[in-house]
Image: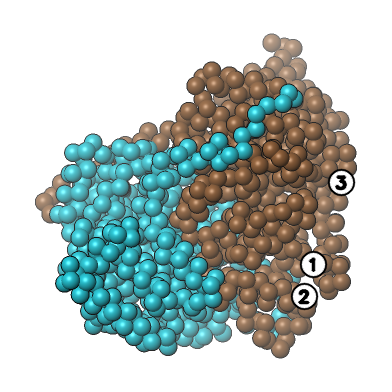
Chain colours: A brown, B cyan
Amino acid sequence: MAPFYVPTSLDERVLRPETLSPNIIKAEYGVRGEIYLEAQKMVNAGKEVVFMNVGNPHALGQKALTFPRQVMALCQAPFLLDDPNVGKLFPRDAIARARQLLKMTGIGGVGAYSDSRGVPGVRQEVARFIEHRDGFPSDPEHIYLTDGASPAVKLALQLLIRGEHDGILVPIPQYPLYSATVQMLGGSLVPYLLDEKKGWGMNIDLLKESVLSARRKGIMVRGLVVINPGNPTGQCLERGDLEDIIKFCIKERVALLADEVYQVNVYQSKHPFVSFKKVLCEMGAPYSRSLELFSFHTVSKGFTGECGQRGGYVEFTNIHPEVLEQCYKIVSVSLSPNVTGQLMVGMMCNPPQPGDPSYKQYAAESKEVLESLGRKARALSEGFNKFKNMQCNEVEGALYAFAKLQLPPGAIAAAKKAGKAPDAFYCLELLKATGMSATPGSGFGQEDGTFHFRTTILPEEDIVPGLLKKVERFNDEFMTKYSTMQSRM
Amino acid sequence: MAPFYVPTSLDERVLRPETLSPNIIKAEYGVRGEIYLEAQKMVNAGKEVVFMNVGNPHALGQKALTFPRQVMALCQAPFLLDDPNVGKLFPRDAIARARQLLKMTGIGGVGAYSDSRGVPGVRQEVARFIEHRDGFPSDPEHIYLTDGASPAVKLALQLLIRGEHDGILVPIPQYPLYSATVQMLGGSLVPYLLDEKKGWGMNIDLLKESVLSARRKGIMVRGLVVINPGNPTGQCLERGDLEDIIKFCIKERVALLADEVYQVNVYQSKHPFVSFKKVLCEMGAPYSRSLELFSFHTVSKGFTGECGQRGGYVEFTNIHPEVLEQCYKIVSVSLSPNVTGQLMVGMMCNPPQPGDPSYKQYAAESKEVLESLGRKARALSEGFNKFKNMQCNEVEGALYAFAKLQLPPGAIAAAKKAGKAPDAFYCLELLKATGMSATPGSGFGQEDGTFHFRTTILPEEDIVPGLLKKVERFNDEFMTKYSTMQSRM
């Protein structure tokens, strides 16, 4: 080949920031943004950091439930089932469950691609779980297993978004998976505010306003995201809210994305979790045959907290059969979700029953996880409420405390000088002073002029009091420093 | 809320085929298309089917290697490491490796999200593997672990495609992951023909023609996909081809996607596998500092065949640092690839060494898998070459035989009548008559007027002769039937 000019400088690259899709550049994902990267640096520098920015329970010491892990071990190494010593390490029901799951996967076990929608036997276990939870039928053919809930959410949004004129209603504050995915798909975010004064409750009138203002901009609203229990806000919606939301969606011709991954993480009794599917079925015809509903669940949260296993599912309700066929095609391109994650979903939906050798331990382990989470939820929200210029709604559910900051003008000015959002500035200082890695409210969106931060409720219980003391000391100094600065201005 | 009209009929749905993005409808994925669905129906009807449509080794009886599975079992159930009986079920080095991997993952083990790019320690193992393979440095910071290779391919294409005016050069025939993903991302496919007469070799002149004709249509070609060893075509490229391809990419300002997932699946010695990265490094400056290269690998193929574990990686070479930052952001939205799949990648890259207790067994197991694949590759291609109107190039590598069909006009007419592509028609008849589920060439793309089918070389060795006999009988009858029909026309 004849010699030719060979470009080697960066600005001659095919791929440069300015040659990427603006949708990529536009997308924001604060949960693993600047604060997280700074925290990583501190860890590499040998400093101690408590990562409270991501709901990653095992990373903060939560133990895996024993039974599912015993079964997974046997599914990974099925030859152990024929070992005369297997009974010395594994209980009878774990061995039986492993045999049963390996029958479901067929000869390939966890080493073979499953059907792209997931192992049929596991999809049946999920359907039975939903039927038992809601008291209404669930069809395994309308359940897809996925690598955690995130790909399921992306799948639903991919169906709803054709371009910038398609809008998705997303709560403010929200879990940034939604904003980032909508942006990457080139759609339009249509934010609606949750009402902090009403414990982060839904306000249907605010929803309607958002839809109208979007339509005035020529945006067709096609989907509504509801996270219940709330992330980052921790509220549990009341049954009446769910009915109003369902009616709103049907009336406005909007599909509903029900993020119910925290359905087990409920720490009070006045607002128990109830699924959208259940309320929809109880509302009966014609509603029950109308709402296009995507419901998401996962093994990453609850009391399993198995984030690294990447197991989740979506249940489709009232989705057009030909659209489901398109879904099947889309997931086929990725061949299959990871099989071990699928089996974890199956065990979450079909745990040991009373009388099984592992039942007592399973029940005790899961009870302890949930009770400890409840205690930590209270400790953190009550703690934060005692601190200067800080207010935190009750953590009714999910894995997060979302605290409001009354930042003095001096702090806001200092943040501006540093080129940071005021609450990002606060979280960065907080991280440096206490080693606590929180996420600023600006990473989730918040009402203009308000500032927040989110922390998980996951650190081990015995370190929580010390952590709170550190935060209180830092917060006092921070607020005092910038108030006095302010008064000196 | 006041009563209102509740739409319940399908054609009032928000989501209908006609309200989805045309990019979704357009996307095609033949590997799990009509034939696969028909095969599923036959299985459900109790008929026997040999699934030779997908490269899914364990599903056809290939055994998992023992060592990695022992280690995975211990990583799933780390409490076994403290059990006095653990030595009765697990060898010393599996126990040691499990401890080492769990040190890499940190306290969360396989139950916690890892860094979104993958566990740092595993990324180092991958880098050392590449350095050992190529004899040139590899930087763990430029390696991302993914849920199999597919998401890594999607990531690269997402960077390259902004819209319909961005084109990706894709071989014909090709693995439809590429066509489907390019279509879903709304980009333009720019096909280039592989030369069947030259054993499916690359022809740089054909590449250039494709680029020119694309540019005439106003399409900016930004990426080139090369699959080596080839899927579905099974050829192994010569070193000279790789140099020409690299020079072509640099000259034409095109990034290279090197699909090298079959790098271990090579069944002859005249065309050994050599990586694009190695050739690029050996070409030296300025080339080595210019080509923007994405290299993909996975645990799904090779002799591990661990498709269900979903473990893979991409190595970035000469990718703009700010583009890498965007990659980090994109993968962060999905939080983390499944951790067990990551650890499988680590063990693939860092297997037992001579002297380790498990070395002999690991070496014997992997040798047997590869040798058996080689024998089956020869048996199938030689068999197909003996059949009427059938011709099959040597399977030099990968997991597939891709046979050419000389279909009589009568068959083409019958297919047309049935509304099917002629080779899809053939594969459907083949499936019904023999239970062999193959994939028509039309699912991969092929030169106009030619017809092919792809089968994996994966069925267990002892059933291959019987399978070939069945195929021969069916093929004879099919060809005779439609030739005589034809002569009667």
Asked whether residue A240 appears in the rendered view, the answer is yes
Chain under callout 3 = A
Contact between labelled residues 3 and 1, with CB atoms less than 8 Å apart: no
Q: Secondary structure at mark 1?
A: loop
Which quadrant would the N terminus of chain A be assigned to in this image? bottom left
Q: Nearer the viewer, residue B476 or B341?
A: B476
Outermost residue, left side: A2
Q: Where residue B196 appears, x then y in whole percent?
A: 20, 66
Looking at the rendered structure, the kind of residue marked 1 is Pro
Chain under callout 1 = A
Outermost residue, right side: A269
> Can you identify the residue that label 3 sits on?
A375
When the figure is inspected, residue B48 is found, relative to residue A415, above or below; the finding is below
Q: Is residue A123 left or right of residue B156?
A: right
Q: Nearer the viewer, mark 1 or mark 3?
A: 1
Q: Secondary structure at mark 3?
A: helix
> Can you identify the residue that label 2 sits on?
A93
Q: CA distance from mark 2 to mark 1?
A: 8 Å
Quadrant for residue B474, please give it.
bottom left
Asked whether residue B296 appears in the rendered view, the answer is no
Counting the numbered discs, the total is 3
Looking at the rendered structure, the kind of residue marked 2 is Asp
Contact between labelled residues 1 and 2, with CB atoms less than 8 Å apart: yes
| First-in-chain label (3 vs 2) | 2
Q: CA distance from mark 1 to mark 3?
A: 26 Å
The image's mark for residue A352 is 1
**Residue drawn at (36%, 73%) of the image:** B430
Q: Nearer the viewer, residue B62 or A386?
A: B62
Q: CA distance from mark 3 to mark 2?
A: 32 Å
| First-in-chain label (2 vs 1) | 2
